[in-house]
Amino acid sequence: MATTMALDVRPVTTRIGAVVDGVDLTRPLDSKSVKTIRQAVLDHGVAFLRGQTITREQMADFMANFGTLVPDPMAVEQKVKPVDSIIDIPTLAYREATAVWHTDSTLAETPSSMIALRPIELPSIGGDTCWGDMYSAYEALSAPLRDMLDKLTAIHSAAKVMPLMKGAGYNPLQEAMHAVHPVVRIHPETGRKALFVNELWTEKIVELSPAESNAVLALLYEHVKSPEFTMRWRWQLGDIALFDNRSTQHYAMRDYDETRVLQKSILAGDRPYGLN
């Protein structure tokens, strides 16, 4: 039976990130706690829970409070049980692919909504992850630029990531997958606008010439890296980061040479929409 937990939400920065204290995932979450954690993710982009020593099944139970557990949208194998969709990823071989600011799975028609990361094994030094707030990134742009971006769409594909993945020894991606999404996404729960292009998956802005598209995307890729919109998290065993894949980007530091294993849990998403 779920018992009420006394939770405390403490922002990490004024723009993104919050630590949620008082959570014990060895016990079922009560409805008030679920609402508090969900609101922390919506308000702060990523919620960090500390000191969680739990099983894979307890992780699946935790994620089920917020949506439907699914495999990575571009994974080849899709017909797996929810608990089996939680995967442990040895990240050392993928450092080049993840050390790029990105939103996960935007080459899919319905990118993931929320994602959780949990360290299983950490290097003695390095291996932090950064998150960026795409609401703030959009709002910091000039009004004329925002007005232009509101009307545009972009192609997302695996064209840029596959060369970075080759040789890693594991390729779960559907390489031919691609999708067209608005450059500015309206969040389905908050109604706020967020930049929805990223350097890893976005290939081209549809309505612009190749030269124009390259110039605009290059500007946006640099813009989202601003320290004003970002934060850096130093992992400890027992941490869980639950983040909103619809309004954030993240970046995995590649400053480590030892084993680093992160457990990844993914929730189903919906088709992004913009003003048009």
Image (spheres, rainbow, N blue to C red):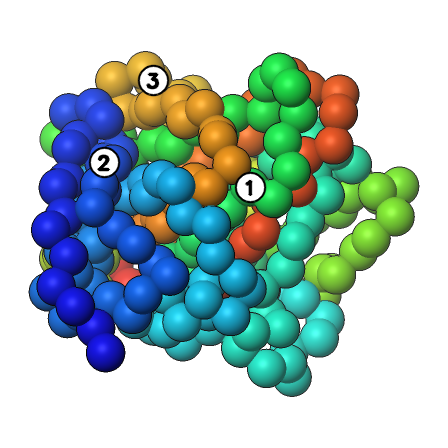
Q: Which residue is mark 2?
A: 18
Return the residue at label 1.
Answer: 119
Give the residue type that dot 3 points to.
Ser
Above or below, 182 relative to 176: above
Would you say 157 lies left or right of 153 here?
right
Residue 202 in view: no
Q: Residues within 10 Å of mark 2 (few under 14, many from 20)?
A: many
Compared with 124, 109 (above or below) is below
Of helix, strand and loop, which one carries label 3? loop
Helix, strand or loop at disc 2?
Answer: strand
Spatial CA distance of label 1 from label 2 is: 18 Å
Examine the rendered structure and indicate whether residue 121 appears above or below residue 124: below
Amino acid beneath label 2: Ala
For mark 3, what is the residue?
A: 226
First reached walking from the N terminus: tag 3 or tag 2? 2
Q: Nearer the viewer, mark 3 or mark 2?
A: 2
Give the CA separation, mark 1 to mark 3. Answer: 26 Å
